[in-house]
Image: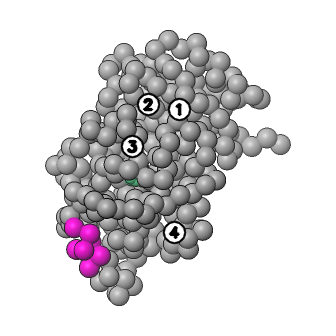
Amino acid sequence: MKVIGSMAAMQRQSAIWMRSGEVVGFVPTMGALHEGHLTLIRRARAECRCVVVSIYVNPTQFGPKEDLARYPRPRHRDLALCRAAGVDLVFAPANLYLPDHSTFVEENHFSQGRCGTSRPGHFRGVATVVLKLFNLVHPTRAYFGQKDAQQVDVIRRIVRDLNVPVKLIAVPTVRDSDGLALSSRNRYLSPEERTIAVKFARLLQEATKQKANQAAWLRRQLKRLAGLRLDYVEIAGGRLCVAVWVGKTRLIDNERLPSSG
Ligand code: PAF
């Protein structure tokens, strides 16, 4: 497995792959890999000749009061997991922005509302880094987790609107045996907080079984749950989408609603 840290070296490698017409599968990550990421990597491994994983904690998608500094960076473990999963190349740059970087990508439909409201500037940072990564890696196929449903919609729209030659694949959310959606941020939770987070995940599942007014039902239940602060509950794209705070940790999740009629 190759590990590349410079943008120039990454572009040299992707130019070689492009010339020989390889199918390149790409899994962009911020590291702290878990079974959710590994599911994306396995899918890429099954479908593509070359598999690239990027590991980069992108500062432009974090707000000034968010967890950029404390975001977990278990680099050795991440590399070992990639190696074991049969990844061909890990792109792990120390930095992707020049000091006078002044260009950003803005998607103005799907990035509105929900996490776009709670985390101003977040999707601009995601959009910019993902387009940069696409231009460096030149993937044929790129894999994203459906847990970040709004992110998937934003990136899909950018790929369409800016004619980016990549096929996006959204992979279903992976859950722990207790139902909590896997997230690198779960490791912030104390045992007591984890118990609350699991109740939150269960209520989301129960909400999808309600015959009507699922969002209102879930909002009511979550407001009653001690130790949890509700950010939003909204239906978007046929999915019940929710964000909450458990202590200092922000968790998001979503589940498809059965189509009515
Ligand atoms: O989903 C993530 O981990 C990040 O938002 C991404 C897509 C790697 C961009 O930094």
Question: Disc 4 and disc 1: Cα gap in Å?
Answer: 28 Å
- Are circles 2 and 1 on residues that touch, CB within 8 Å? yes
Does dot 2 land on a helix, a strand or a loop?
A: strand
Residue extending furthest toward the bottom: 19
How would you rate the neighbour count of disc 3 (Cα within 10 Å): few for under 14, some for 14-19, many for 20 or more?
A: some
Question: Disc 3 and disc 1: Cα gap in Å?
Answer: 16 Å
Residue beneath disc 2: 250
Residue drawn at (46%, 32%), measured in percent from left and top?
Answer: 251
Question: Disc 2 and disc 1: Cα gap in Å?
Answer: 7 Å
Quarter of the figure with the C terminus: top right
Q: Nearer the viewer, mark 2 or mark 3?
A: 3
Residue beneath disc 4: 167
Question: Disc 2 and disc 3: Cα gap in Å?
Answer: 13 Å
Q: How is the image coloured?
A: one colour
Q: Magenta stretch containing residue 110, yes or no?
A: no
| Label placed on residue 163 | none
Residue type at mark 2 is Arg
Residue drawn at (37%, 38%), measured in percent from left and top?
Answer: 64
